[in-house]
Image: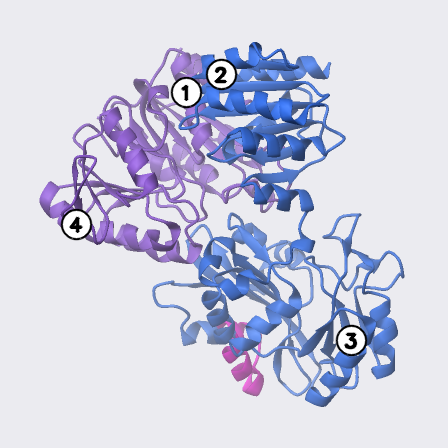
Amino acid sequence: MFPSRFAQNILPMNIHEYQAKEILKSYGVTIQEGIVADTPDKAHEAAKELNRETGTEWYVVKAQIHAGGRGKGTVNETGSNGVVLAKGLDEVMPKAKGIIGGTLVTHQTGPSGKKVNKVLIAQDVYYPGANEPTEYYLSILMDRGTGQNIIMASTEGGMDIEQVAENTPELITKEWIDPSVGIQGFQARKVAFSLGLSGIAFKGMVKFIHSLYDAYVGTDASMFEINPVLKTSDDKILAVDAKVNLDDNAMFRHKDLAELRDLTEEDPAEVEAGEHGLSYVKLDGNVGCMVNGAGLAMATMDIIKLSGGDPANFLDVGGGANAVTVEAGFRIILKDPNVKAILINIFGGIVRCDRVANGVVEAYKNIGDINVPIIVRLQGTNAEEGAKIIENSSLKVTSAILLKDAAQKVKEVLM
Amino acid sequence: MSVLVNKNSKIIVQGFTGSEGTFHAEQMIEYGSNVVGGVTPGKGGQSHLDKPVFNTVQDAVNETRADVSIIFVPPAFASDAIMEAADAGIKVIVAITEGIPVKDMMHAKPYAKSKGCVLVGPNCPGVITPEEAKVGIMPGFVFKKGRVGVISKSGTLTYEAADQVVKAGLGISTAIGIGGDPIIGTSTKEAVQLFMEDPDTDAIVMIGEIGGQYEADAARWIKENGNKKPVVGFIAGQTAPPGRRMGHAGAIIGGKDDTAEAKKRIMAECGLYVVDSPADIGEKMKEVLG
């Protein structure tokens, strides 16, 4: 996605659309109202409640997953799209049935899709009236180049913003916000004018932008993407969708927001790794690796590729490589049936290599049946002692000290 | 002379009496760094590791004439510590702390700049000038004295590169771990500038990662300024899949311009010596310096 190019390098915490909208609303941002439901029955009840609150007679049933492209995505089991319109209360339950519990595949989920546990029953905001409803694009994110937040807006709402940036970059307005003074009135007006608005809609958009920026700063967000922002037929400004990423590092001061994390949306192996203080990302290759430090871990993945293999994972054991973390790392890597070899690459600084070596030997013995060759490359503090421990262990483990030797050994075991 | 820190640096430790601060201050003192004291609010007047503890950085500066500070303060209070150091007139601030909220750094970085000081990090291994001063958490023995400057976003990869340079029979003038966070005090380009101006540095190792524009900016600056010293470059993350977070904050691929391939291409076009394998950094440097 386009904003990620700017928002990169911030540990993002994703939340659902319905949660994002609740947050926005609490800051005074006007939203398309909705009620979340996790069964078709509750969806029906939610629609009735929504009718009482807003008077809406049509309803939008929206799958709640952490991925975009839901409207065009398809639920494997039923063929339903991820976002559908129910033209009347009696249509809500069957439409919800077609989505809840199903597997939604969109261009962002990958072919295996994501299980839908909840739907948002939302009011219909595209009702006819004096003017045509019009969609806009609005986002706020951190621009790493300037170290400032940037507001991006476009008249091309509801479109793939990356395409807009590629083909018609002049249709995207950018406004940088000085963090020491925050957003100023002229900036919000500039953005609203750039969207060609006037009258009530213009005033509504200015207020919308101010509230949105307050919400962004107030929640320690790393990205807000509102696509589309809608001008209704009666000139109201509403957030119809909301993608919100929060800065994981700031969650210590937002305990309420931290609770919004939905672990069912995350990879179970990655969650398990996190519980052990490891950072793990599964990949599709055949050589597992375990490394201390993210940069060295990526460099090690590159070495695996250059040696004729493909990295099966990224795994950073961080600063505390010991028997417990090494064993946890082994177990996570070994769950992947594609792994044909494992390369452990530790540069000992504060962590002493002899301790890491003992940790490897101990973990190996605890697990018992490791049937893939393991190459252990230890460098830095007490590297020689570490190598001796590995060599004298009588396990199916080879040791290396230089990185290029490790690369050569990976090559040999793959041949 | 080297850059940023040397044997004349008077160093204080913020977060001195905490476990991290204590451990690394001890290591720094053992290495021979001139640690003149530390700051822990509320513990002023005490002594720790045989050095005086101060309540404020201002007190420490007044008493010790400190000009360098290293920060081990927990993330929630780290940006405050950075600004306190800048306000007290510290010239070089090295922020080790990992996990500082982006919003906090958005304020602390311009503040430090407005006070005219150099901020390195946060989320970095620090700065070392071998045989003179270690202001960081790196294993000092890896860094033997010499005339190659090292710049890197990540900790252990910095050690790896330095080790290779040393094993190739060369040595390090200064190594700067600039950190991998979205907002860092000293960019790759600024670190390169320091080394280009340093009479004791003959060549530079520049190690980057996927994500961001820092390496491309640095490479273009190097070319515009006439490639005065040879630069060996490596970008980690050629095999990292797009759009995924790789462990620490620095390592995400965002768009098509900041992939490893794109960065390496730009670096090569700008006259840098780019290696594909991280195992070849030392040998390449040796070959370049012939």
Tell me what hue chain B is rendered in: purple
Q: What span is colored magenta in the figure?
A: A190-208
Q: Which element is circle 1 on?
A: loop
Q: Is residue B83 left or right of residue A61?
A: left
The crowding category of the residue bearing disc 2, from other C-alpha atoms within 10 Å (few below 14, some 14 to 19, many at least 20), is: many
Q: Provide the chain ID for the residue under circle 4.
A: B
Residue A108: horizontal and vertical position, in percent? 72, 52
Q: Amino acid at mark 2?
A: Gly
Mark 3: which secondary structure? helix
For image coordinates 66% across by 78% down, the residue present is A32
Q: Which residue is mark 2?
A: A386
Instruction: Report the amino acid beneath label 3.
Output: Lys
Three-letter amino acid code at disc 1?
A: Thr
* Colour of chain A in the rendered structure image: blue
Which circle marks residue A381 in the picture? 1
Relative placement, left or right, of A61 versus A307 is right
Q: Which chain's residue wears label 3?
A: A
Q: Is residue A202 magenta?
A: yes
Q: Residue at x 35, y 24 (%)?
A: B229
Q: Main secondary structure of the magenta part?
A: helix
Q: From the viewer's side, name the closer residue of B251 and B207.
A: B251
